Amino acid sequence: MTMCFADICQPLFSEACDSPLVSNLPQSAFRSSSQLSNSHGPGYAKLNRRDGAGGWSPLVSNKYQWLEIDLGERTEVTAVATQGRYGSSDWVNGYFLMFSDTGHNWRQYRQEDSIGAFSGNTNADSVVMHKFQQPVFTQFLRVLPLDWNPNGRVGLRLEAYGCRYKSDVVSFEGTSYLLFRTTGPSTRNLLSMNFKSRHNTGILMHVEGQHGQTLTLELLKGKLFLHLRKGTLQCITQLCYLLLDDQHWHRVTMEHLRGRVNFTVDKTTQQLQVPQHQSHFEINEISFGGVPAVGSEHSRRNFHGCLENVLYNDVNVIEMARDQQLSIMGNVTFSCPETVAMPVTFASPESFLRLPWEAARDGLAVSLQLRTWNKVGLLVTFDLRHQAGTLWLYLSEAKLRLQIIKAGRVTADMAAGMALNDGQWHSVDLSTQRDRLVLAVDKADTFTTTTSLPVMPSTIYEPSCEAYKHQGNTSGFYHIDVDGSGPIKPQLIYCNMSDKAWMVIQHNNTELTKLRASSGISQHLAHFNYSADTEQLGALITQAEYCEQELSYHCKKSRLLNTPDGAPFTWWVGRLGEAHTYWGGALPSSQQCACGLQDDCAEPARFCNCDSDLDAWANDSGVLSHKDHLPVRLLAVGDINRPGSEAAYRVGPLQCYGDKDFWNAAYFNKETSYLHFPTFHGELSADISFFFKTSSSSGVFLENLGIKDFIRIELSSPTEIVFSFDVGNGPFEVRVETPMDLNDERWHHVRAERNVKEASLHVDHLPGARQKAPADGHIHLQLNSQLFVGGTASRQKGFLGCIRTLKLNGNTLDLEERANITPGVRPGCPGHCNTYGGLCQNQGHCVERHNGFTCDCSVSAYTGTFCHKEVSAYFRPGTSVTYVFRELSGNASTQSSYLYSDLSLRGENVSLSFSTSQTPALLLYFADPLSCVLTASSSYPC
């Protein structure tokens, strides 16, 4: 006996489908968004296991993390169970469960069509199981943590339960089909199958009766229809109002009894009364995937997709086709190739995706497909380069609309397409072709407009965390492009913005790692793999002002460096491959620990605490800060093979702050002063960039001469910069005029580029200028003089002001080094608050530093890098904070006198923000007394 439900068709009284599916999988079956360390990797996320660190934990606990499990093949999954990470405070309170056949196209599991999270754990060790109302047939499972212990991290161990799923599949490419002929009449016809479509239209099944009746199951524009036909009489019924061309499996069952047909599509069942002329339906043949000659009443398209487990009256149709026991027309395969397209559903008006973007420099190309029932909605928006405005691509009255808006003014407006809210897929293509912006819908409806805007998105990454900080960015992950147009690839790095901008570069094991005595093992080797490669690390460290890395060793009867006279038991290897025998906090080549340098080791005759070989725990900790030796690539621990020996080590992440290139500056205080450098070699291409600030109306930034050729960048007027050169074809100029004066003593950025095809000039984030090179002529720039910066040998007037971060073809010139030995030029440049002081918010005060600035938040109720975080506190019932204000007396401290020197008190103004669920509640109380009480009945608490 067989029963068919929405998502499952199986014999009654079958064996229980509840076997564990995860516990025996190899580590390669597990993937995750990130991992805190090697011992916190996804392969340790097995229920009741204590391997590694006792479970999976991501590098950062947020809602963007996931754990994925590959079950190896499509499997029937009936339940899932979770635990936290063993022996920790890390667990997940709630999560979403996703499933996929490909690992690319995901679908959320829903209990009875509700969108809801699974409840998770309340501690690290108890098991919480959820049995599914309907099983899932899938190869991949993915868990998305939503909430976790606020006093810990995301921590997870998991098991899934189910059983092996028998899957017979066949794939059709749009012209093929299977032809199945029945053996005789039947009083009851039962058919079931799963389908997954790659096109929105096609015939799934066509049935021919003995007396001219036909029954056709057709997918038409993503919806499923049933056609019943005899002669000229026809009945068409829509079986499902959902769109089924979503690249997921859908189940169809059909039971034909005399006089009625019961149809189930996924979880929706319809009972259809068959017309009298169709009630005696004796099936002669069934074609799956299409028909040989489709009539005008159909879509004229065969099915393009996959069918699975096709059963007709318990006969396995696909198995018969594989054994060539029925007719196969055209090309079919007995597998289901998967597409890598990944559609995304935005489930609410508040949902959106924010994606990193890296576009080509010579144009813009955006393409997407959409389908919706809504007439309005935002599709894509991004800022254009050089502050040219913001591009908005959206639906308005079911038409596609594109606008570019700058300073509240619409500078470009385009529309294309119509009736795009029909639930069908529509393609959108946006591109630039020379000076034209082209918008096309469904490859047909195209709108083109001419624009002079630089429509390339802002894709140039900054060279350091320091540069991101001075754009007003707070702590977070940023792409660092250390050499600009050079060969080193950008790297995603965490920037910790405080008074300094720290780059934090993680490796595979920043946790405290314990070691115990083990016979036969004389040495433990730990290798550290960083999130940046060797070339990137070298460039980041060289460019930074300061770098450090914590190195700690905890010991019990385990010697470290064996000082003062013995050979070291433990050593480490740096970036360049050399072994080092000094420890954190000590000087290079000293073979000492920090206590040896400070002369406070446990034994005065030793240079490390651990070298005392005590039968009690001790430690040697400190930071390594010699940049040429960083980071630690390998650690070798030696004295761990004696009975009773125990040790633990920790190698922290590499941390660096500062950017020597970003603040490498020179101040030119005479028009006749200049710096000179070796000849610039930019024969075929030149990429020059720098910052400047000045109060002068004109001046030459740099110049390099040849016999006839030259290259020059100058400020020709307060509102114009000129990039000029000659490669033998006569002088060539590119000019940019600005709407504001550039001699305002604020930093401005210039970038000039030249190649054999064209030259361009950009100033700050304004629209740039571009000139094409002559089609015929010379292309090599031949220079032979020295490069002059801040002045010139051929002009009278040099530059007055500051130049910094001067880069030529990715190489930064050391302006400060030359300025130290050049009369009329000073290294460095003061006055950064003129440019960056506006980044200090909420009455924060900008404080000048030699390299940059900081925000003083002492007179503000805010804190953080830019005084942008509220100072707040959480009050439990019965708790409060009291401040005592004293009047200033004659003997007030100097500091107090300074703070109140300009205070003339005429009144007091107090402001605060609060959030509470309790009333009444005392918010603020003054001894005057003046009080502010929150009551249950008042609209305004004060």
Image: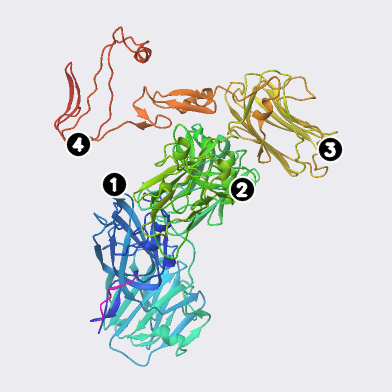
Q: Earlier in the sequence, mark 2 or mark 3?
A: 2
Q: Amino acid at mark 2?
A: Ile
Q: Earlier in the sequence, mark 1 or mark 2?
A: 1
Residue 15 x/y as whole percent: 26, 80
Tell me the CA gap for discs 1 and 4.
17 Å
193 relative to 118 in the view: left or right: right
Magenta region = 14-21
Kindly state the secondary structure of the residue where label 3 is placed: loop
Q: Amino acid at mark 3?
A: Gly
Tell me the CA gap for discs 4 and 2.
52 Å
Kindly state the secondary structure of the residue where label 4 is placed: loop
Residue 876: mark in rendering: 4
Name the residue beneath numbered marker 3.
728
Q: Amino acid at mark 1?
A: Pro
Tell me the CA gap for discs 2 and 3.
33 Å
Residue 109 x/y as whole percent: 32, 62
Kindly state the secondary structure of the residue where label 2 is placed: loop
Q: Disc 3, disc 4: CB below 8 Å?
A: no
- For the question of whether residue 448 can be seen, the reply is no
Tell me the CA gap for discs 3 and 4.
79 Å
